[in-house]
Image: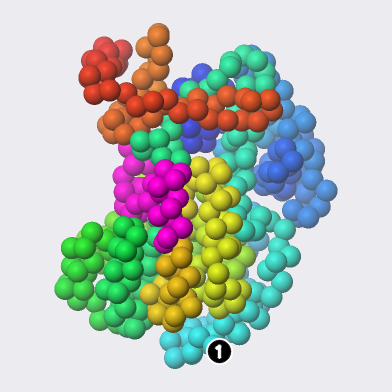
Amino acid sequence: MINETLIERYRCPDRFAEFTLSGELSRREGYFRFGNESICYGRSASGSPARLATEDLYDAAAHSTTDGLTLRLPFEPSQVIDNLRRERYVTDPHGSGRGLGARSVARSAYYLVRPILPVRVRKHLQRFHLAGWERIPFPTWPVDRTVEQILETQLTLILQSGSVESVPFIWFWPHGSSSCAIVTHDVETAGGRDFCPELMDIDDSEAIKSSFQIIPESRYAVTPRFLGEIRDRGFEVNVHDLNHDGHLFRERKEFRRRAGRINRYREDFGARGFRAAVLYRNVDWYDALDFAYDMTIPNVAHLDPQRGGCCTVMPYFIGDMLELPLTTTQDYSLFHVLNEYSIELWKRQIALITEKHGLVSFNVHPDYIREKRARQAYESLLHHLAQLRRERKVWTTLPGEVDRWWRERSRMRLIDRGDGWAIDGPGRERARIAHATLEGDRLVYHIEAATSTRTLRRLERSCRTVT
């Protein structure tokens, strides 16, 4: 359905998201623009999609027209956004190539000796492999917001047509929060495991609860007492790969065998979330994983062994599993690849993400922040997040809570009462109605005030009648 992604994102009534194709789509997929900022990948009904993102790209917005509430586009937004979120624009991400990220003898040898390599050796190998990352033109570093820009351009074109003055929708986060932030910790070594209690103390110092992704096999002993301590303190336990050998997605048959074991550890750990080692991934195989949500796909992967990125700062569904993209640079890359111990890059990424009201997600390893400079940087980050929570109403929460909210919101709908809009569906008491309008040529959002309990009960009776 051509309007599926807009309705999924905004939870607006269907009649505000009516689109049709302006012509027959090209057979070949490629790159084109939709406005000045958005690079798309897919098929087009006008122009000729380019083979590379660096070529001179035609602008599909120039070939978009409106007729009342119907927007005629020369491409299918749902297809293009799906291509981005599933990284289908990446050429041969799992095939042969140079360095540690390829399926090669070098990769196998690296992961065989990786557990015994000191960080000072690993970081030099990784810098060699990542050489030239700053020249990658797409996705956009340090945060890619292409999906958000495509959807906002669609709304802008509808509003510019003059057929409506505003588009009502269900706000992205509960209680009108401006954005959301989560902190996660992948535990890679026994030393990192042993540091977890102290790390929980650090997180608690700013009243920020986090999730701990635990490797089930080979790396270190995992006891019920260890998992229980994390949960008893209000933190979250998730599964991190199977054994962190870098080969989870190397071959499909072996992946499915490992996925069966991983799913059993989900039950043993009482976990709902998953992240693969080294952010290796193959979205087409995700149906074998039995988790509520995944946290593997980076927003932009210039500093990761597997290049690509989902180009969005919002959660999205892959089948029945919710993806919570990793939208900021990992601590290891910041400290040991970029050799940076300030939080200026993180603050820049936070600003770009929250500008689009997105999900700010961090992965900070207990293995790499035991050293003084790294720990101080992490403490500065937590202090900054706590400040954003106070001053800008950023919702700091656990990944599992984001999953619960996003699933509730996905089942909500707006009901036209005649004298205004009401939200129907479980969890609506936390939801807020918002309106997208134009100020000049700029798209802006306005959030309505909370509805009283008495009004909610009256609306509930009214919604049942309408249903």
- Where does the magenta region start and end? 382-411
Question: Is disc 1 surrounded by few (<14), some (14 to 19) or many (20+) residues within 10 Å?
Answer: few
Q: How many marks?
A: 1
Instruction: Name the chief secondary structure element in magenta.
Output: helix
User: What's the coloring here?
Assistant: rainbow
Residue at image coords 42%, 60%:
383
Q: Secondary structure at mark 1?
A: helix
- Where 297 sits versus 155, above or below? below
Queried whether the magenta region covers residue 72, the answer comes back as: no
- Where 302 sits versus 114, above or below? above
Which of the pair 426/3 is nearer the observer? 426
View extreme (right): residue? 56
In which quarter of the view is residue 49 placed? Answer: top right
Q: Is residue 337 visible?
A: no
Q: Is residue 350 visible?
A: yes
Residue at image coords 27%, 73%:
197
Residue 453 % position (x, y): 24, 23
Residue at image coords 48%, 32%:
10
Which of the pair 403/176 is nearer the observer? 176
In which quarter of the view is residue 230 placed? Answer: bottom left
Q: Judge from the rendering whether residue 210 lies leftward or rightward of residue 73; answer left or right.
A: left
**Disc 1 designates what residue?**
121
Mark 1 residue type: Val
Figure quadrant of the C terminus: top left
Residue 20 % position (x, y): 63, 24
In which quarter of the view is residue 191 placed? Answer: bottom left
Residue 72 % position (x, y): 67, 24
- Where 13 sits versus 151, above or below? above
Residue at image coords 54%, 88%:
120
Residue 25 % position (x, y): 70, 35
